[in-house]
Image (tube, grey):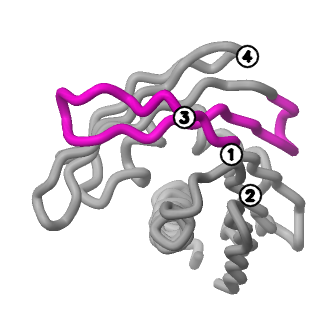
């Protein structure tokens, strides 16, 4: 899977190939049953998701990081253009039980068919506090890697018997 990450100023831009159609990748961001399986490092055993799927709806994500720290993230859907584009107003949280930061960044995810059964995902996370850009860049690189693995495994489990994936 190719990946290009470009942190600059208060923006992170990442482009990555995904092993699924644009509709499947788009759906992985909105379906809470799918989102919980890839967004956090511990998968569904260490992640909780409450998700809305309409403009203005909220999604809350609670994860346990590899080192054991528990964190909370929140986004509100600002724009839906299935299956081409999602825009979220994004809030970082701290440890579980702490308040979300009052600061809102913007997360835009675009999906473009790049071949049969593959999608070029372009993720732009902007309006970031400057001190968070490096960590956000690393985080989205890791998270989109988990998304690619989830989509690959999901596709393999859907392949008819006797068909190679």
Kindly state the secondary structure of the residue where label 1 is placed: strand
Kindly state the secondary structure of the residue where label 4 is placed: loop
Residue 83 among those drawn in magenta: yes
Q: Is residue 152 left or right of residue 60?
A: right
Q: Earlier in the sequence, mark 3 or mark 4?
A: 4
State the image quarter where residue 115 is shown.
bottom right
Span colored in magenta = 80-106
Q: Around disc 4, counting alpha carbons within 10 Å, would you say few (fewer than 14), some (14 to 19), or many (20 or more)?
A: some
User: On the image, numbered disc 1 is attached to which residue?
Assistant: 107
Which residue is rendered at x = 76% and y = 38% of the image? 86
> Is residue 19 placed above or below 3 in the rendered structure?
above
Q: Of 51 and 22, which appears nearest the observer?
A: 51
Q: Earlier in the sequence, mark 2 or mark 1?
A: 1
Question: Which label sits in the foreground, 1 or 3?
Answer: 3
Q: Are the residues at dot 2 and dot 1 in contact (C-beta closer than 8 Å)? A: yes
Residues under labels 3 and 2: Cα distance?
Answer: 17 Å
Q: Around disc 3, counting alpha carbons within 10 Å, would you say few (fewer than 14), some (14 to 19), or many (20 or more)?
A: few
Q: Around disc 1, counting alpha carbons within 10 Å, would you say few (fewer than 14), some (14 to 19), or many (20 or more)?
A: many
Looking at the rendered image, the quarter that the C terminus falls into is: bottom right
Kindly state the secondary structure of the residue where label 3 is placed: loop
User: On the image, numbered disc 4 is attached to which residue?
Assistant: 55
Q: Is residue 105 left or right of residue 45?
A: right
User: On the image, numbered disc 2 is attached to which residue?
Assistant: 124
Residues under labels 2 and 1: Cα distance?
Answer: 6 Å
Q: Are the residues at dot 1 and dot 4 in contact (C-beta closer than 8 Å)? A: no
């Amino acid at each position: 899977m190719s990946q290009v990450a470009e942190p600059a100023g208060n923006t992170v831009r990442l482009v990555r190939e995904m092993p699924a159609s644009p509709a499947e990748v788009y759906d992985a961001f909105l379906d809470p049953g799918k989102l919980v399986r890839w967004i956090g490092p511990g998968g569904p055993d260490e992640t909780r998701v409450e998700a809305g799927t309409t403009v203005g709806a909220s999604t809350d994500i609670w994860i346990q990081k590899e080192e054991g720290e528990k964190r909370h993230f929140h986004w509100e859907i600002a724009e839906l253009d299935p299956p081409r584009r999602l825009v979220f107003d994004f809030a970082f949280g701290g440890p579980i039980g702490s308040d979300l930061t009052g600061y809102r960044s913007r997360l835009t995810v675009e999906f473009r068919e790049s071949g049969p059964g593959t999608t070029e995902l372009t993720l732009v996370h902007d309006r970031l506090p400057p001190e968070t850009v490096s960590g956000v860049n690393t985080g989205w690189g890791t998270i989109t890697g988990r998304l690619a693995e989830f989509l690959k495994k999901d596709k393999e489990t859907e392949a008819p018997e006797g068909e190679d994936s």
